[in-house]
């Protein structure tokens, strides 16, 4: 049985997660500034209060973006069904994805549970996705079948995602494609994934 998710993999995954979290911090600007002016008019004094709204204030919160999608490959290494949601009430920024999947071929069957924290950048329908996390694998191999790189193991591997996401601003079909490095005792294995799903709110 192979050993997975070494100390190096854990450290790299935590480093990526901390980097995403720190980049998502929002500094609240000073929203208002009150200016008082006095103007003498004869024997009376008129006090004028002016409220100035900071032009750098953040955009108003909207509905939380949520998607569900089928993925081939990717962090799940199989055919997986996944759910993705933003932590804030907006389409971009910090969020997460979680899923479950299974596939069998040539005497090998693999069950996987991919989990990632991700961050979406961009405007409109085209977004860049950056993510990092871990995947639980339970693989039962067959010595008479073809050799599978994760043959006969139960454990965790580290994963990352660098990809493109087409996600409509309203409800509709979403598409994803990405480069997915797999981190294990054998080193970093280059992999990828494609998906199709539905964006809803």
Image: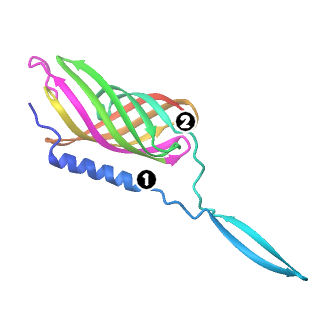
Which mark's residue is nearer the viewer, 1 or 2? 1
Residue 156 position, x and y percent, is 20, 36
Q: Residue at x 52, y 60 (%)?
A: 28
Q: Residue at x 56, y 43 (%)?
A: 124
Nearer to the camera, 193 or 56? 56
Picture quadrant where residue 112 is located: top left
Mark 1 to mark 2 CA distance (whole Å): 22 Å
Magenta range is 122-148
Query: Element type at marker 2?
Result: loop
Q: Nearer the viewer, residue 111 or 193?
A: 111
Residue 15: image location, x then y, percent: 27, 53
Quadrant where the N terminus sits is: top left
On whether residue 170 falls in the magenta region, the answer is: no
Q: Is residue 57 above or below residue 140?
A: below
Q: Residues within 10 Å of mark 2 (few under 14, many from 20)?
A: some
Residue at image mark 2: 168
Colouring used for the render:
rainbow
Q: Is residue 142 left or right of residue 79?
A: left
Q: Which residue is mark 1?
A: 24
102 displayed left or right of 94: left
The percent coordinates of residue 184 (x first, y second) are: 18, 41
User: Quarter of the image holding residue 201?
Assistant: top right
The front one of 44 and 163 is 44
Residue 185: x %, y % from top left? 14, 42
Q: Does the magenta portion include 145?
A: yes
């Amino acid at each position: 049985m192979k050993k997975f998710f070494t100390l190096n993999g854990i450290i790299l995954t935590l480093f990526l997660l901390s980097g995403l979290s720190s980049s998502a911090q929002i500094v609240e600007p000073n929203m208002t500034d009150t200016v008082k002016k006095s103007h003498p008019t004869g024997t009376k004094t008129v006090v004028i209060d002016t409220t100035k709204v900071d032009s750098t204030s953040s955009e108003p919160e909207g509905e939380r973006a949520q998607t569900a999608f089928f993925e081939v490959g990717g962090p799940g290494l199989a055919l997986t069904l996944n759910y993705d949601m933003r932590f804030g009430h907006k389409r971009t920024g910090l969020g997460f994805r979680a899923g479950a999947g299974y596939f069998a071929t040539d005497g090998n069957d693999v069950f996987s549970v991919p989990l990632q924290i991700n961050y979406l950048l961009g405007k409109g329908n085209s977004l860049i996705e950056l993510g990092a996390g871990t995947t639980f694998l339970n693989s039962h191999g067959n010595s008479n079948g073809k050799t599978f790189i994760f043959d006969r193991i139960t454990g965790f591997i580290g994963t990352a995602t660098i990809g493109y996401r087409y996600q409509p601003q309203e409800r509709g079909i979403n598409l994803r494609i990405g480069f997915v490095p797999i981190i294990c005792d054998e080193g970093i294995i280059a992999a990828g994934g494609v998906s199709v799903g539905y964006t809803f709110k």
